[in-house]
Image: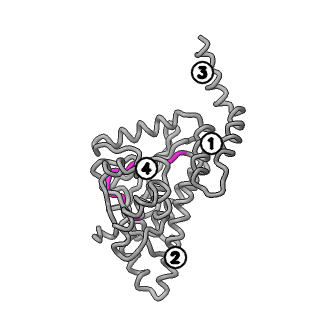
Amino acid sequence: MAATGDAIVVVDGMREPQIAAKGQTETAMFQTSVTGRIATMVMSLPPVNALSEAWISGFAREIGALEARSDWKVLHIRSDQKVFCAGADLKEMRGRFEAANGPDLTYAYVASIQRLYSRIESLQQITLAEIGGAALGGGFELALACDLRIAAAEARLGLPEVQLGLIPGGGGTQRLTRLVGRGLANRLILGAEAVDGATAERLGLVQWACPRAELANRALEIARRVAALPTGALTAAKHCIASASRPGRGGYGDELELTRDLQTDAETRERVSAFIAGARA
C-alpha cells in the first residue's frame, strides 16, 4: 500500500490522542463556521488529513463545541486538501508497531476512532460528507459515519486495510455491511478494492456523485435543502431510520411514538396548518 507524506491509507494502531503534532495546532487542523443553520467543518491538515492522534482529539473538540450550540441543523464536513481524508499517520503508526506494547496501543487508538465516529453518527443533526478526493481506510470510515455522502466522480473510496494484514477497525466492517449488505462488503473489504466516485454512487456507497468541478455547489445545495426542513421531523426521521438497523429495537413503535410527539411540535403545527390552508384555498 502506498504511503503519502506522513500518512498511509490505513487506520489501525495508536493510543488515545492527546498532543498536537509539532508545528500544527489543533485549531489549525479544522475551520468550523455556522451560517444559515449549516455548520461547515473544513478539515485542513496537510498533506492528506491523516488521522494522527492530535487530529482525532481536535475533531472531537470541534464536535463538542458544536454540540453546545443550537443554531445549526446540518454538519457539512469537507476538506481543503487534495484528498478528503487518508488513513493513519505513518510516523505514529510505525512507533506503535515497533513498541513492545504495540497491540495494546493499537487497541486503544482504534477504540478512540470508534468513539469519535459513533459520536458523529449519533448526532441529532444531519451530517453530510463532501468527498472531493481520496477517502480510503479511516477516511472512508469517517464518511460512512455520516448520514449523507456526495463524492466527486474522480475520487477514490475504499477500505484497503487487508493489503497490510489489517482490518478496517474504525467501524468500517460494520457500517459498510449495514449500508450495502454482506455480499458487496465482502467484495470491497476482502478484495481491498477501491472504486471511483461514480462507481461508489452506483454501488450505494454514496448517495450522489458529480464532476469535481461541480461538487462544492452540489454539496451546498444539499446542505441548504436539508437545513430548510423542520428540526423536529429531521431528528425523528433520523432516529427511526437508525432503529431499522438495530436488532431488538422496535422501529415501528418508534415511528408511532415520534409521530405522536411531532403533533405538538410548534414548527410541525405551523407547516401542517399552512399546508391544510393551502389545500383548502
Alpha-carbon distance for marks 3 and 4?
Answer: 32 Å
Q: Which residue is mark 3?
A: 275
Alpha-carbon distance for marks 1 and 4?
Answer: 21 Å
Q: Which residue is mark 4?
A: 129
Q: Is 263 on the left or on the right of 214, as rendered?
A: right
Residue, far top: 281
- For the residue pair 255 and 110, the one nearer the viewer reads as 255
**Pair 2/1: label in front:** 1
* Residue at 50% from the left image edge and 75% from the top image edge: 15
State the predominant SS element of the stretch in magenta. strand
Q: Is residue 44 above or below residue 103?
A: above
Judge the density around disc 2: few (<14), some (14-19), many (≥20) Cα neighbours within 10 Å: some
Q: Which residue is mark 1?
A: 236
Q: Which residue is mark 2?
A: 107
The span picked out in magenta is 126-137
Q: Is residue 94 above or below residue 269?
A: below
Label 2 vs 1, first from the N-terminus: 2
Amino acid bearing label 4? Ala
* Residue at 49% from the left image edge and 82% from the top image edge: 103
Amino acid bearing label 2? Tyr
